[in-house]
Image (cartoon, coloured by chain):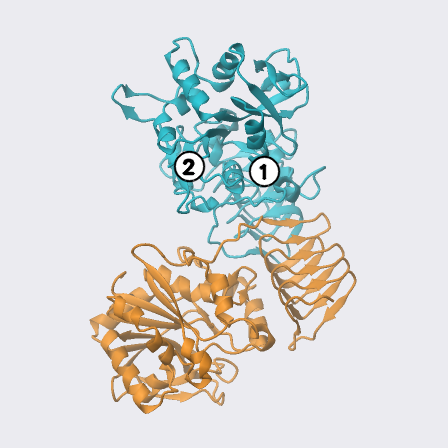
Chain colours: A cyan, B orange
Amino acid sequence: MNKRIVAMILAGGKGTRLESLTRKIAKPAVSYGGKYRIIDFPLSNCANSGIDTVGVLTQYESVALDTYIGNGEKWGLNGVRSLTTTLHPRQTEEGLSWYRGTADAIYANLDFLDSVSPQYVLILSGDHIYSTTYNQMLKQHIERGADCTISVIEVDPKEASRFGILVTDEKGAIVKFQEKPKNPISNLASMGVYIFTYSVLRRMLVGDARKKDSSHDFGKDIIPTMLAKKMKLFAYVFKGYWKDVGTISSLHEANMDLLLSSKGQNIYTIKGGNTIFSEDTHSHPQYIGRKARVKDCLINQGAVILGDVERSVISNEVVVAEGAVVKNSVLMPGARIRAGAKVFSAIVGPEAIVSHGEVVNEKQEDIVLITTRRKNNGK
Amino acid sequence: MASKVLGLLDLHNSPDLGPLTSSRVLASTSFLGRFAFMDFALSNFSNSGIDEVGILVKSHLRSVLKHMGSMQSWNINTKIGRQTIMFNERGNMNRKKNTDINNFLVNDWVLHESKAKYIIIQPAHVICKIDFEPILKEHIARDEKVTIIYKHITNAHKSFATHNLVNVRNGYVRSFKRNRQLEKDACVSMETYIINRDVLLNLVSEALKTNPMYSFKDAIKKYANTLFKVHAVEHLGYARSFDSLQHFVDYSFELLDYRYAHLLFIKDWPIYTITRDTTPTLYGTKANIHNCFIANGAIVEGRVENSIISRNVKVGRGAIIRNSIILSDTVVGENAIIANAVIDKYCLISDSVHVEGVKGSPKYINQGKRL
């Protein structure tokens, strides 16, 4: 097989700041937008870009994520010319080793990349929400004869210290790179989206793997080394909606961004001309009851709304009982809001229940997370 | 059950729903905003563990193919399962011979390639949930040749008009007769049968000798109690025969009532359909919705009551929709009013336009109309 470009999606992270939402599933598998899981976005972006070979690198709580990804059928990545596979840390002659960093995860799977022998490798994060195609970025990479192209986005200078920050010259060549700097020198943030020419990437990863003092990370090790060697690194400026949801409140905010009342965007502007492919649950049609009030919401099939819901994102198989009130909240699949319960500014996790008459977060000072389940499933 | 049973979805007896089915078969017609009629019968096969399915198509093959796609949605169109479209090409030239029996003969390779010992025939226009596993078990245990599934109803004068009535005694059908809609209390055939392979082959050859225009329905009626006895099994659950535009509307609205819906939408009995990867439904700040099924992909900014809104429908601000069914991709403009109507796909109802029918006689708007 000789592929022009292969995508490798880093999906092994836990997402610690998402608290108990990621207790049993990896962050890329977290529900979003009533219907999706976060990883639907990078996978749909690949599908919409015509990238038909995708490796998904999983590590933390990978069972649910691996099952979800399957053979890539949900994103149309299961055709005769496509290949979708999950890649886990494995036992080798040298023993068992976990992925030690983002670069190490790719290094550990060089045999997979060799077997498909791509010209270019696209490295993606499994936990970013944005809808795009990578075709323009690849075109730029090829035209400039780059070794590596990094997708960047302008961020609020106050936020800049959370990201890898870089400085470019007038031609877009990267001249400086700082990983999560205390005093950022620009507001161009790396999105963690890289295109490498494969021969270069291979050489860099093999070199890095030998270094004892390396943390085997693209941002901390590979990119600085390439800059030091004066290799050709370019920035590709991305314009549009992009979210790296790290916390409960940013996950809540990203959900609210989908609504018609949100300023500057909604689900249709965020997805642009692309389709976000996802799992199709075999649900009944969504039912809105006689006494229901539904305003400013995004609601998925299978939901039953008998109560009052406003400014909320509601997933499949959710039931909001009569007399219940849900405002400014995200209800994940299978959540139950019982009669008379009131939920304000909350994320209610998958299968979680808010009992009869219970009032959640009336003060609304912050976004709260509810994950009490009907059954504990022995876990 | 996989290799023992071949399921046949028979579209030859589907009733005509007037303009709604002028360019498509009922089987592929939109139902509850999200499904096509045939999804229910195909899900019955799939959930009963039947992986080999043939679909006997009488006409409007285009609309069937459009809905079926790769056929992976319902059944396991995999290396161990198979789903096949059986189209009666000869029937197109000779309409009178466009029967399910002739179709079956044209496509007899389906049975020859199959190892199935039993054939289950099901129509698409009867919406019901049937688990064939226990019925087949009983059929085999009793060593029956033909089993029919019937339903006892108390409104035969107003429903199942195209079906035969069955006179059942001691577990067997004594006689069949047409439903002339004279009696209220009656047992109706659900046009659903289990037939042994050899009995089916014999039935087909006998039927053709007698009358080349016979359908399975005619042939079973004709040869019951001569070639074979017909074992009768009563279906106790929900079943509706969609045989007119009025019934299409009434039965759709009936399912808005949870007392009916819960008979059809059962946990562990999913209704499979094709996915279109549409976004969830988006409701505006001025939306006002009561007693509705609303499909994904819709954007609703107006008022909608006692209605069914299908995929990708847009309802503009100030628009009012009451007691209506809006099929997919239709746009309802701002301040438009729609009442007691069925609006077919891809229509454009411009701003402030009124489309109003009367209760009991829904106004129908053709696919693609601009008003």
Residue at the right extreme, as displayed: B352
- Residue visible at 33% across and 77% down in the picture: B105
Chain-order first, disc 1 or disc 2: 2
Q: Quadrant of residue A145?
A: top right
Q: Are marks 1 and 2 on the same chain?
A: yes
* Chain letter of disc 2 in the image: A
Q: Is residue A175 above or below residue A292?
A: above
- In the figure, is residue B251 to the left or right of A256? left
Q: Quadrant of residue A168?
A: top right
> Total marks drawn?
2
Circle 2 is placed at which residue position? A65
- Residue visible at 46% across and 60% down in the picture: B265
> For this rendering, which residue is in front, B49 or A337?
B49
Q: Position of residue B266 (x, y in %)?
A: 43, 59
Q: Is residue A94 above or below residue A279?
A: above
Q: Quadrant of residue B233?
A: bottom left
- Residue visible at 65% across and 29% down in the picture: A365
Residue A24 shows in this picture: no
Question: How busy is the neighbourhood of tag 1: few (under 14 within 10 Å), some, or many (20 plus)?
Answer: many
Q: Disc 1 marks which amino acid?
A: Ser
Q: Locate the N terminus of chain B by quadrant.
A: bottom left
Q: Position of residue B39 (x, y in %)?
A: 45, 63
Circle 1 is placed at which residue position? A131
> For this rendering, which residue is in front, A11 or A145?
A145
Q: Is residue B285 above or below residue A236?
A: below
- In the figure, is residue B294 to the left or right of B336? left
* Chain letter of disc 1 in the image: A
Mark 1–mark 2 Cα distance, whole angstroms, equals 20 Å
Q: Disc 2 marks which amino acid?
A: Leu
Q: Position of residue A123 (x, y in %)?
A: 48, 28
- In the figure, is residue A319 to the left or right of B48? right
